[in-house]
Amino acid sequence: MALPEFFVAGAPKAGTTALHAALAQHPGLYLSAVKEPKFFLTDGPPPTQGGPGDVKTYREHVWQRAEYEALFDPAPPGTLRGESTPFYLYSGDAQRRIRALIPDARLIVVLRDPIERAHSNWTHLWSAGLDPIDDFVRACDAEDQRIAAGWADFWHYKRLGLYGEQLEHLYSVFPREQVHFFRYRDLVEDPPGTLNRICAFLGVEEGIVTKVPRENVTAHPERTLRHQHLSRLLRTGSAITARLPGHRGKALIDRIEVRLQQGAAPRQPLNWDERHALIPYFEDDVRLLGDITGEDFSPWIRPREDSGGLVGARPAGQRQARNGRPREF
């Protein structure tokens, strides 16, 4: 069987695309050409409906066993096979499916400041014209309603950042020695050291891969009438093409999304009001994460400038300057 032996399992918007690309450069590793097969997210075909754009994503799932194994057939002999689906950390069912089929699998987990992660997640979908709510906090407030309506996991802006609960479950399924977690800021600030620790965890030679490519940078278009018009057009088009067989209409939707992103600036940083609104949601889970890992994650829920190195306390309405901010993947 050509099955993976390791997974980059999470979290979304935490540098997993860049990490996948970096590890793919190691001669002792083989990463699937499809970065997010999502095979273990379902036990059969994916859903056929959801939120804006979800059906298009579901159609990209590699859910058939033969098709999934074919992703790893090209792996050179002696290499470790791996794939990167960052929703495996979030899905307890996926973790159990991996354990049942590949009990010795090793899982790599990247943890990013959960509020910063949620903001990047929302910006990704809003800038792509999919989220109709143009305010981050209000979009987060809509989460429970969207989940009840069956929208896909990528819309779970807050819940995707409950790492304490997720790691607690993962450790109940896999032995801790088969899980390697680290912080997103380590990947940003110390790529060689972080990559060496991952290679040591996987048992391949260190010092070969030292750089992480710049990947998957979230754009942030201006809130203009043009953006509103194109966004509505994209959501309407996505709803129509979801009813069409195969990938008909995909090219048109892709062209609209490209136009939405043209000339857009990088993602704007959080302001203090936004961060303050979400801190209470994560407080208990951040403490749980600290208890589980024995590490201190409390800066994520403190109004201090060192909270993940990303957002500090500012008077209401002020944006933090980007000077000295680590580059984003």
Image (tube, helix red, strand yellow):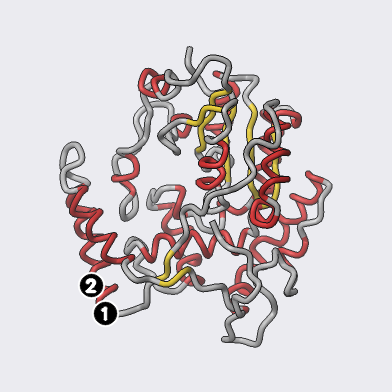
- Image vertical order of residue 174 relative to residue 181, above or below: above
Location of mark 1 (residue): 225
Q: Position of residue 174 (x, y in %)?
A: 68, 28
Q: Is residue 94 left or right of residue 301?
A: left
Q: Position of residue 75 (x, y in %)?
A: 48, 21
Q: Secondary structure at mark 1?
A: helix
Q: Nearer the viewer, residue 172 or 193?
A: 193
Disc 1 residue type (three-letter):
Leu
Which mark, residue 257?
Answer: none
Q: Is residue 198 left or right of residue 251?
A: right
Q: Is residue 143 left or right of residue 242?
A: right
Q: Is residue 295 left or right of residue 219?
A: right
Mark 2 and mark 1 residues within 8 Å of each other at the beta carbon: yes
Residue at screen point 46% across, 48% down: 153
Q: Position of residue 270 (x, y in %)?
A: 57, 73
Inter-mark Cα distance, 2 to 1: 6 Å
Disc 2 residue type (three-letter):
His
Q: Quadrant of the C terminus?
A: bottom right
Location of mark 2 (residue): 229
In the picture as drawn, the residue positioned furthest to the right comes out as 294
Q: Secondary structure at mark 2?
A: helix
Residue at screen point 49% across, 59% down: 121
Residue at screen point 21% across, 47% down: 250
Q: Nearer the viewer, residue 19 or 1?
A: 19
- Image vertical order of residue 54 relative to residue 71, above or below: below
